Image (cartoon, grey):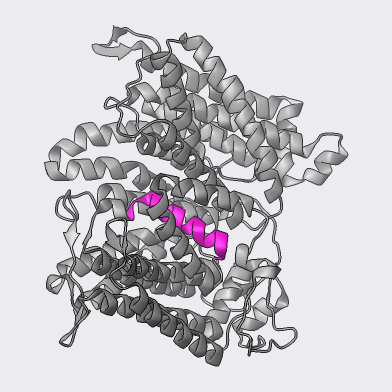
Amino acid sequence: MLGAGYAIAATGLVVTYTTSGVFNFAQGAVGMVAAFCYWELVSAHNVPVLLSLLIILVLGASVSGALVERVLMRRLHGASSERPVMVTLGLMVILTGVATLVWSPTTERQVNNMVSGQFRLAGINIQYQEVLIIGVALAVAIALRALFYSTRTGYALRAVVDDPELLAMSGVSPNRMSQYGWILGFMMAALAGVLLAPTQTTGISIEAMTLLVVNGYAAAIVGRLKNIPVTFVAAIAIGLAENYVINYILPHVPQNLVPDITYALPMAFLFIALVTLPSVRLRAVGRLTTMRAPRVAGGRESLVAGAGFFVVAIVVALVFNGTEVKGTTFLDLAGLVMTLGIAGLSLVLLTGYSGQVSLCQFSFMGIGAFVMGKIAGGGSVLGLLAALGVCAGAGALIALPTIRLRDLYLALATFAFADAVATGFFPDSHIYGSGGVSIGRIDIFGIDFAGDIAEFLLVTALFVLAALLVLAIRRSLFGRRLVALNDSPAAYATVGLNIGFTKVAVFAIAAGMAGLAGALYGTVQGVVGTTDFDIFPGIVFVLFITIWSIRTVSGAFLAAVTYVVLNQLWPNGVGLFAGVGIILIGRAAGGLLGIGALQFRLPWVRRPAGVDEMVGSPVGMAAMNGETRAAG
């Protein structure tokens, strides 16, 4: 039954991707909103079931799908492949944020079966609801297969991504076909959400329903995002495998591990599907675009700016020492900004420079905080080094099976890892449990940093050092190779350079930085738990960095400031701000700081003419051999 629900959601993903080249990360969120709307209509207002379905599917999903395609996705045509990922993630957090505001997460909501009763077949009691879900899934798969391969409209839907210009020459509007695809995709997501809602025996919840269709992601990947029959069969197989694991394997494992394994299963299936399918089949649809890379500060300029930043931090520490802000101190909040800034710098290095989309930096932060808390009482230099080393090793291990993945598929793999860690590892009683982990302030060779000023200046100094390191890497030969890898992996490999080594190295460095950020985050907070490093806050933080600029050090810092400030002012609205922000700048590939009027440089530094590098130009290949022009 679960497999049939996954099949409906997965076929919707395939339809959307086939007709637009965009993988909709918000598919689960659409189903979640539909499930809550169904509860609102049927349970809260006693609207008949069939009428409720018509309202949700026809008036809700179809209109929403058309609106999303027209307002958001049409603007992304021809964009670099990571931008649609970020925009659909933004749509996901908008929907979850709106749902949180409309339907309080503390209220339990139970959805009854659409059809009641059961019958007995071969000694097994089968509910009519289960038959309904399977029948609808089968009918959807057959109908979509017939649509795509037996009708003129279906041929046009499949052709819109491959060659929209040729399709337009035949008298068919590519925009209209893409809009039809999004309408169908949203309707499939809503239908899956409504049908799967009664299967949630403990009641529907925003996070659980949003992530429920992740197995649908795995099925869509098995179907290579284009084959509906294979996708349907894969979804059924994944649903059966999940039931077999839960009913036949989990009873034989230690009971304290059962919840962790259960929660991690969907993401495990997705990760396995991504790393085992032939890489030649996993290529995202899109166009190569050119983007002007931000200017890289020179060594002297970086040192001067870092020293100036630290002086400002000293003044801030002296002026605001002891200032209270909503139950905490201003310097503690400022310390959190610096620690999150280090995590942001890891994304600048990994995603901004090398183009490796990662959604799991908060997971490495959580691992780093845990290691810090368990080593030497949680306040030692040894704990910091251990957090950095363990996370760097974990990053390398994650990078190894995903070496051949890029763009969408790497984002999906890191998404799977992040959710598996957040739901199957951190909640374990031996890790964070319910009480969290206490982490003391740092003591370096007898120098105690327990005071607020000392702690803030320490994390600020480490942020400055991390920023200088990132900029130094960017100016180095390795940094130029990262830019070239982002430019063209095929050309990078053609000239004899090792793509695998470069990817593993940059992943390890970025993961180590995130682990260091998590350890410092713990020293500032004092106590950290599972909610600090959940998958949704991690995604929101990535969106904030993208909004400002994921290619600049300034973008990492401003993202950290925005994230901390909004969490203090309106915690439930952080996702909304991030989602709306990422959508509003959908056309600004370089973020706000990439807009000409917002590009800053130190006033005494004169910029030489022609120092900009063009991603997608011959400069990128020259950079691999150290031939690129120096900046600053």
Quadrant of residue 134 in the image? Answer: top left
User: Is residue 109 shown above or below 230?
Assistant: above
Q: Nearer the viewer, residue 148 or 217?
A: 217
User: Is residue 105 shown above or below 607?
Assistant: above
For the point 42% across and 85% down, the residue is 311
Q: Which residues are magenta?
A: 533-549
**Magenta region, main secondary structure:** helix
Q: Pick the quarter of the image with the C terminus.
A: bottom right
* Residue 622 as seen in the image, left or right of residue 467: right
Quadrant of residue 443 in the image? Answer: bottom left
User: Is residue 560 shown above or below 566?
Assistant: below
Residue 298 visible to the viewer? yes
Q: Position of residue 492 (x, y in %)?
A: 60, 74
Q: Position of residue 424 (x, y in %)?
A: 26, 48
Q: Nearer the viewer, residue 372 or 303?
A: 303
Is residue 537 within the magenta segment?
A: yes
